[in-house]
Image (spheres, rainbow, N blue to C red):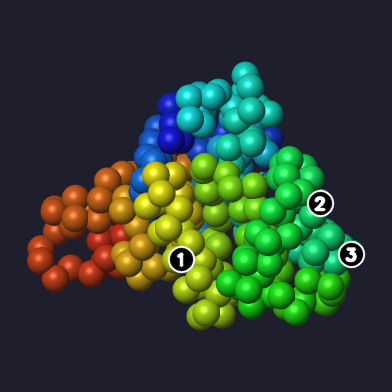
Amino acid sequence: MIQLEHVSKVYNGTHKAVDDCSFSVEDGKITGFIGPNGAGKTTTLKMITGILEATEGSITLDGVDIKRNGVEAKKKIGFVSDNPDSFLRLKGLEYLNFMADIYDVPTEGRSEKIKEMAERFEMADALGDKILSYSHGMRQKIMVMGALLHSPSLWILDEPLTGLDPKAAFELKDMMREHADSGCAVLFSTHVLEVAEKLCDKVVIINKGRIVFQGTLDQLRQDYPEGTSLEEIFLAVTEHA
Ligand SMILES: Nc1ncnc2c1ncn2[C@@H]1O[C@H](COP(=O)(O)OP(=O)(O)OP(=O)(O)O)[C@@H](O)[C@H]1O
């Protein structure tokens, strides 16, 4: 479970990108983090993963405070950032072993795990090539594999489906559902409302740095006439906030 309490982020001493945000990401659920461009999604996800420090407020991961006990907290997370252009000079397999070493994935069973994931994402034939030679979607896939190799209990994914082909997107969505069904927590940001509608058990909507809604999609729809599309509701929620 991820818990944010009164979290704010001020950039350069002046720009409040995230403003007094409190929400929770529960175990056993997929939570969608939705908001327009510049709303504060990436900033919030980076604070949850400890890449950025919150200016104010507290963030706990399975009860562990990220500020007080960063190393323990970070081990619980598998984070897929919105920029897959990293470690380009490494071969796919080198990158996966590098990530496995960082997260203490035992060598026993490691190859089988890599093989299983690579087959699922149709990456088995590409693991011997440098990431530099990969397409955007392949880079995205290798980053997802690297983030999930250590079987973290909390999955945090920033726009994970961008650039993935339908098969890879299907597999990733399936993995997210399996992970939530096994009692773990999944938080992902998206602009694609249809994905949120199909996949999420809960949504958190952020606009101009503030949380404007959190709950189920049924709860979100309650205040709108039957037949109103999610897109219309989303625009109403973010425009009137
Ligand atoms: N390093 C930074 N320095 C200063 N301002 C920043 C920095 N990173 C983000 N911002 C600003 O903070 C606000 C929130 O940005 P953020 O990237 O968190 O939004 P987002 O919801 O992820 O947007 P998008 O959907 O476009 O990726 C924006 O106004 C952005 O310009």
* Residue named by callout 2: 98
Earlier sequence position, callout 3 versus callout 2: 3
* Residue named by callout 1: 173
Q: Is mark 1 on a helix, strand or loop?
A: helix
* Residue named by callout 3: 89
Q: Distance between the residues labelled 1 and 3?
A: 28 Å
Task: Kindly identify the residue that appears in the image at 68 percent across and 29 percent down.
Answer: 71
Query: Which quadrant: the N terminus?
Result: top left
Q: Is mark 3 on a helix, strand or loop?
A: loop
User: Residue 196, position in %: x, y?
Assistant: 37, 62
Out of 111 and 179, give the one closest to the viewer. 111
**Relative to 6, 236 lies left or right:** left
Q: What residue type is labelled 2?
A: Phe
Closer to the eye: label 3 or 2: 2
Query: Quarter of the image holding residue 226?
Result: bottom left
Q: Which amino acid does label 1 sit on?
A: Lys
